[in-house]
Image (cartoon, helix red, strand yellow):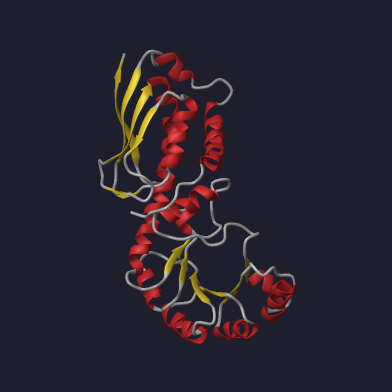
């Protein structure tokens, strides 16, 4: 289980509120209002249908509570918990109408975010005893970045820069427009605050040598195989952080980690992770 602090409710609540408003539209849940008796009560559990790592419990809980404040919700498996198929994640008790109305939004969040946590945990396991850490990128769903990066942490990974404003990452297009790696690095340093780090992307050992001669905090080794990565790590020799990136799959992680890199980044763990199947098992009383 990953021991991570929960995201502030102040940050999560507006995201969940917007999702509910999108679903409720102009007239609310007209099906539930017409079919489910107002006096009916719900009691039951949100259950994992497949094994995985849980993330998004706060978003799911808030989805129910925004629809009706009288819910009684107990989170049994907090973010970072590894669950088996059939294992309850939270117990829920409250008005049946409100449960059915909030159900899909709650499940959308927790299933998506748990899927991210699950694949992240798989990559982390692939690193084994090597020092490399698994990190996500900025390839996130618009407006869900905070939740998705939190889900990566729940799976045992770490976050790359959160946005364009908290670190300098000089990529190939920047290099081309600046006239080369050296001019790009020098321009970045000329206006850089002392708290901001510089990372530069390289494709070849020649580019790597040029970046090292200029002095940077981190090197992104793009689309290099394990053999080339080992040579690159040896060249870096602790002078900068080393990051392997570029179409990295779970099968490739052990060999990449063995190269000695500090970081392995994968954009697909946020933008293409399959959802973890969760559902509601419940009973109704009147």
Image location (x, y in percent) of residue 138: 56, 58
Q: Quadrant of residue 131?
A: bottom left
The quadrant the C terminus occupies is top left
Residue at the (54%, 82%) spot, across then down = 239
All told, the count of numbered labels is 0
Please indicate, yes or no, whether residue 274 appears anywhere in the rendered image. no
Q: Is residue 256 left or right of residue 48?
A: right
The quadrant the N terminus occupies is bottom left
Give above or below for 187 relative to 143: below
* Front residue (pair 267, 70): 70
Image location (x, y in percent) of residue 210: 62, 85
* Front residue (pair 31, 135): 135
Give above or below for 82 relative to 129: above
Q: Quadrant of residue 78?
A: top left
Residue at the (41%, 71%) spot, across then down = 132
Give above or below for 272 relative to 199: above
Q: Is residue 214 left or right of residue 158?
A: right
Residue at the (73%, 72%) spot, across then down = 177
Give above or below for 101 relative to 46: above
Image location (x, y in percent) of residue 94: 37, 23
Image location (x, y in percent) of residue 268: 47, 58
Please indicate, yes or no, whether residue 222 appears anywhere in the rendered image. yes
Residue at the (43%, 44%) spot, across then down = 56
């Amino acid at each position: 289980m990953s021991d991570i602090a929960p995201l502030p409710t102040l940050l999560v609540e507006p995201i969940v509120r917007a999702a509910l408003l999108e679903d409720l539209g102009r007239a609310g849940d007209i099906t539930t209002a017409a079919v489910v008796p107002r006096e009916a009560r719900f009691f039951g559990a949100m259950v994992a249908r497949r094994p995985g790592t849980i993330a998004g419990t706060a978003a799911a809980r808030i989805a129910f509570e925004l629809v009706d404040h009288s819910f009684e919700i107990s989170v049994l498996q907090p973010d970072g918990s590894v669950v088996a198929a059939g294992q309850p994640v939270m117990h829920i008790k409250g008005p049946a109408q409100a449960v059915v109305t909030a159900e899909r939004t709650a499940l959308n969040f927790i299933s998506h975010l748990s899927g991210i946590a699950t694949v992240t945990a798989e990559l982390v396991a692939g690193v084994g005893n090597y020092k490399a850490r698994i990190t996500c990128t900025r390839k996130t769903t618009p407006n869900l970045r905070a939740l998705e990066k939190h889900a990566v942490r729940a799976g045992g990974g770490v976050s790359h820069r959160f946005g364009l404003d908290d670190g300098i990452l000089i990529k190939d297009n920047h290099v081309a427009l600046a006239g080369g790696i050296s001019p790009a690095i020098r321009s970045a340093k000329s206006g850089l605050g002392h708290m901001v780090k510089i990372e530069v992307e390289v494709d070849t050992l020649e580019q790597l040598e040029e970046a090292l001669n200029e002095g940077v905090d981190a090197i992104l080794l793009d689309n290099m195989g394990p053999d080339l990565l080992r040579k690159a790590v040896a060249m870096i020799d602790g002078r900068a952080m080393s990051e392997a990136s570029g179409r990295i799959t779970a099968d490739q992680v052990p060999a990449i980690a063995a190269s000695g890199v500090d970081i392995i980044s994968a954009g697909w763990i946020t933008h293409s992770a399959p959802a973890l199947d969760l559902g509601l098992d419940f009973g109704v009383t009147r």
